[in-house]
Image (tube, rainbow, N blue to C red):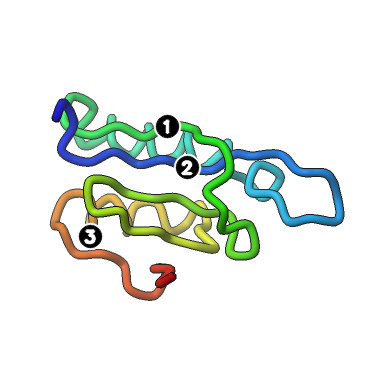
Amino acid sequence: MKYKKHVFICNNQKAAPKKSCGEAHGNELVDAFKAALAERGLLKEMRAQRTGCLDACAFGPTLVVYPEGTYYGNVQLSDVNEIVDSHLVNNQPVERLKLDF
């Protein structure tokens, strides 16, 4: 596997009144994760990228971290550094944001 961790961040756009991760700062989350990884010199080991719908719209904005398959919901820009430091770097998922399906 090329990357130790891969973060897929939903930026799907849906018509109102449905909740939409893209409308709820999904694109900004992608940029924030990329910046956080770059600041830590992790871009060769970890990747953050946009994705379409993760089928967790009610919990958006959502993202999933692989290879674990850990889903996070209601992720705010203020949560990015915690997810990067706790989960991506130290392999400790952020329990308060985890979605358990």
- CB under 8 Å between callouts 1 and 3? no
In three-dimensional space, the C-alpha distance between marks 1 and 3, rounded to whole angstroms, equals: 19 Å
Q: Is residue 79 left or right of residue 1?
A: right
Q: Is residue 97 above or below residue 39?
A: below
For label 2, the residue is: 9
Q: Is residue 53 left or right of residue 85?
A: right
Q: Residue at x 52, y 57 (%)?
A: 76
Q: Is residue 79 above or below residue 53?
A: below
**Amino acid at the residue labelled 2:** Ile
Mark carried by residue 94: none
For label 1, the residue is: 49
Earlier-in-chain disc, 1 versus 3: 1
Q: Residue at x 32, y 58 (%)?
A: 70
**Amino acid at the residue labelled 1:** Gln
In three-dimensional space, the C-alpha distance between marks 1 and 2, rounded to whole angstroms, equals: 6 Å
Earlier-in-chain disc, 3 versus 2: 2
- Closer to viewer: mark 3 or mark 2: 2
**Amino acid at the residue labelled 3:** Ser
Quadrant of image for the C terminus: bottom left
Q: Residue at x 64, y 64 (%)?
A: 58
Mark carried by residue 86: 3
- Secondary element under disc 3, as helix, strand or loop, is helix
- Secondary element under disc 2, as helix, strand or loop, is strand
Q: Residue at x 14, y 30 (%)?
A: 1
In the displayed orientation, state which residue is furthest to the right.
Answer: 16
